[in-house]
Amino acid sequence: MKSSERAAGSPAGEEGYVFNIQRYSLHDGDGIRTLVFLKGCPLRCTWCSNPESQGLLPEITFDGRKCLGEDCGFCLAQCPSHSLAFDAHGVMRLETDTCRQCLQCVPACPTHALHAFGQRITAREVMDIVEADSLFYARSRGGVTLSGGEPLMQADFALSLLREAGKRHIDTLLETCGYGPWPALQALAGYCDGIYFDIKSLDDARHRRFTGRSNHRILANLLALRRHFPSLPIHVRTPLIPGFNDTRDEIARIIDFILPLADVSYEILPYHRLGSDKYRLLGRPYPPGDIHLPEETLANIIPQARRRLGRRYGPKGARFMEEPSNKANAPAT
Ligand code: SF4
Ligand code: SF4
């Protein structure tokens, strides 16, 4: 990862870029959790449901349904690149090719038709928000989940967040696509109570075509995680994507890879189109187009995974229901 890809000017990672903090989540780890979504991702998965997470810096979106039209026009004078203009029908257009992402137009818009995905924020500020729900975490065995984007893109900031959570005795979970330098992942894992790790395909050529990156580093990182942190709960997830990995053979290869890894649990996440509207707001085409996951595909593939993995298969993974806290465990050497 190039240094220019990291959050600029964030001493010791105390500040970074976050595009959402979602409270009361029940689906990304045990109990009630607060999800902190970090900006920046090294992959470009064609089916990505969080396209606003991909760039490291905050980015502009425009929702024409909220625009007041020519009666307003407050944003026009703010734009240094003349990227905002009304067309012949009086409809506001954002020219994404010339927009410099300076965000000067955002505060001028009274209806939030112009909106910035992402903000620069300190680790303490994030954890102040997270800690407000400590009572819920204590009662439900929940905590905070770092997600993205890919937290490894802002590894120093992610480390600050995890340390701050540790100081406040908040359970920590990391969601990662696994693509990043091993030393960074190793440092983060030492402060995690569990890791959700994506494995999308064992076929490297296919992986490159659909995500823009090789899977070699990802697979090596998963092996290293299990080796260096033998008691850390690791839950592998595979998004099941039509035309990419929705065959019994593809999933069988992934299961073959994780079966020898002691106590690693597994889950298949069926494809959904929930992120498609965000592409419209960002002024981008939706790359997967009109694809769907047939019911019979699911009926074929998920029972196969259940049969082979037994109690290691399922939402959240059996390990996450049983393991005591692993925080700050010294890694194996
Ligand atoms: S972000 Fe900056 S360049 Fe882009 S439309 Fe707004 S004011 Fe113009
Ligand atoms: S400021 Fe907002 S509501 Fe007004 S014209 Fe610009 S985009 Fe539309």
Image: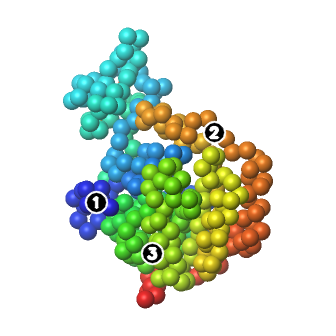
Residue 226, position as x, y percentages in the image: 52, 79
In screen coordinates, is 325 left or right of 41? right
Instruction: Identify residue type, mark 1.
Output: Lys
Q: Is any part of residue 127 visible from this angle?
A: no
Label 2–label 1 contact, CB within 8 A: no
Instruction: Identify residue type, mark 3.
Output: Ala
Residue 67, position as x, y percentages in the image: 42, 24
Q: Which of marks 3 and 1 precedes in the sequence?
A: 1
Which of 235/35 is in front? 235
Q: Quadrant of the C terminus?
A: bottom left
Which of 72/284 is in front? 284
Instruction: Identify residue type, mark 2.
Output: Ile
Residue 296, position as x, y percentages in the image: 78, 48
Residue depth check, mark 1 versus mark 3: number of the one nearer the observer = 1
Which of the 4 image quadrants contains residue 77? top left
Q: Residues within 10 Å of mark 2 (few under 14, many from 20)?
A: few
Which of 197/221 is in front? 221
Q: CA distance from mark 2 to mark 1?
A: 34 Å
Tell me what residue is drawn at x 78 percent, y 53 percent.
Answer: 299
Q: Residues within 10 Å of mark 3 (few under 14, many from 20)?
A: many
Mark 3: which secondary structure? helix
Residue depth check, mark 3 versus mark 2: number of the one nearer the observer = 2
Tell me what residue is drawn at x 35 percent, y 66 percent.
Answer: 155
Tell me what residue is drawn at x 32 percent, y 48 percent.
Answer: 57
Is residue 149 depicted above or below 274 in this figure?
below
Residue at which label 3 appears: 189
Q: Which of marks 1 and 2 precedes in the sequence?
A: 1
Which of 2/324 is in front? 2
Q: Which of marks 2 and 3 precedes in the sequence?
A: 3
Residue 214, position as x, y percentages in the image: 46, 59
Residue at which label 2 appears: 291
